[in-house]
Image (cartoon, coloured by chain):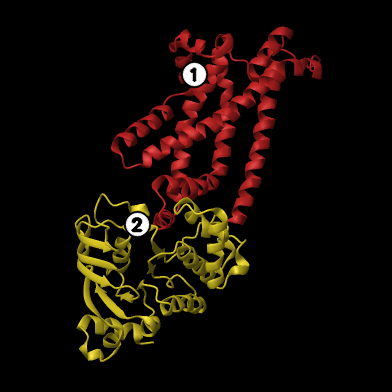
Amino acid sequence: MATLDFSFYTWANISNYLLSGLYFSVSLTIAATIGGIALGTVIALMRLSNVKLLEYIATWYVNVFRSVPLVMVILWFFLLVPSGFYDLFPGGSGQKYRAEICALITFIVFEAAFFSEIVRAGIQSLPRGQTNAGQALGMTYAQNMRYIILPQAIRNMLPVFLTQTIVLFQDTSLVYAIGAYDILKGFEIMGNTFGRRIETYLLAAVVYFVISFFLSMLVKKLNQKIRIVR
Amino acid sequence: MIEMKSVSKWYGTTQVLNDCSVKINKGEVVVVCGPSGSGKSTLIKTINALEPIQKGEIWIDGVAVHDKATDLPKLRSRVGMVFQHFELFPHLSVTDNLIIAQIKVLGRRRDEAKKRGLQMLERVGLIDHQHKFPGQLSGGQQQRVAIARALSMDPIIMLFDEPTSALDPEMVGEVLDVMVGLASEGMTMMVVTHEMGFARKVSNRVIFMDVGGRILEDTTKDEFFGKIEDRQPRTREFLNKILQY
């Protein structure tokens, strides 16, 4: 086994490779969470609607994305979507950030399948009487969802959302497959530059661990808080 | 004001309402009682179409509830309903519980809605609790807020679905007091309850339902609580049981 050498671990070296990758990974996590919850809510509502066609589409959407590895979805999107798609973005930015755009879209689409199941469980966990109460006050289906059901469902599901977000954050490392510049990519370049890949991958693991662990602690705290309010 | 004509309802092949006909005039207080599984709650929920019916007609103030073309949200906004488990919205403060439907459904301005809501809260004796959340209130208080919420919509009739059966005994009185007050002011009310004291005190009519969703009796209060020998055997059995203690 080669001896490890950590002498190049200076802040100047690390920050040089870490920061822009970290920025992308975190942005992707936040954007995919927000986009995933938004799209996931729509899919959950479709699944719970009594319109057979919508139910069918939503069920298949969820089943397909839950049964396929994320990295494949990323690769397919990257390889199959024609280059013209990226011209839709202004000022040539589409071509420049091709991998990043591809990552963002696939993550939202993929995560929506998971978030939709969380939203659905959240809605179904509410007593039926809540829906009845909203209806009895004269609310339409949309009003009932918007003001009564979804706020409660999403609040109840907050810890689960955050847990999913932590998984999502770790999954962002998969964008290495299409060469987007995330945390892992930054450290890979650093490792190649210094000829020290084992050390930089170790450091990458530490960065993922610290952030994920911190978020997990946060979820735990939040759980306790919610338990008190309920 | 309310008229149900030969209403029947099935869950799958199980019949839960069997040819029920009821008429409630303006200002009347009608109590519905009967053993569990007799379809009392289902009956009251068909009036504002929370439970759909398969046969028969239901009219509220000239509007056909059973008609598919009827604007149900609009109709329901005129019918107040109080539930067994209160069903306040736990994520909203007491005030917001009172005003949300006024604003979103009736289109009232916020200050106008708040004024009306707080008037009703005052009336159920809970004005000091306006900033609290439902979870901070006792069951009896929650139910009174629920009544205030329904009243804030200025309903033409109030439906009560076992309003006291989920309450601790010591809280039943405070809720019944509010209901007695409402009745004495001439509110049209339909009340599913086992509180025979309430029925005796304020109701005009008593409806007795039996298993299978049939209305066995629909009589005036005096008749119902008069000579028990005049009641149907099934009613007698029920009354003997619940009046025993």
Q: Secondary structure at mark 2?
A: helix
For the residue pair B151 and B51, the one nearer the viewer reads as B151
Q: Residue at x 56, y 65 (%)?
A: B118
For the residue pair A213 and A6, the one nearer the viewer reads as A213
In the rendered image of this protein, does residue A89 appear above or below residue B147? above
Q: Nearer the viewer, mark 1 or mark 2?
A: 2
Subunit of label 1? A
- Residue A52 has which mark? none
Q: Position of A224 compared to A72: left or right? A: right
Q: Position of A34 compared to B41: left or right? A: right
Subunit of label 2? B
Q: Residue at x 43, y 42 (%)?
A: A120
Q: Amino acid at mark 1?
A: Ile
Quarter of the image with the N terminus of chain A in it? top right
The residue carrying mark 2 is B75
Q: Position of B214 compared to A60: left or right? A: left
Q: Position of A55 compared to A27: left or right? A: left
Res. A10 visible in picture = no
Percent coordinates x, y for residue B223 in the rendering: 26, 87
For the colour yellow, the matching chain is B
Q: Secondary structure at mark 1?
A: helix
Res. B226 visible in picture = yes
For the residue pair B17 and B169, the one nearer the viewer reads as B17
For the colour red, the matching chain is A
Q: Amino acid at mark 2?
A: Leu
Disc 1 crowd, CA 10 A, few/some/many (<14, 14-19, 20+) = many
The residue carrying mark 1 is A74
Quarter of the image with the C terminus of chain A in it? bottom right
Percent coordinates x, y for residue A137 in the rendering: 42, 57
For the residue pair B32 and B122, the one nearer the viewer reads as B122
In the rendered image of this protein, does residue A58 appear above or below residue B123? above
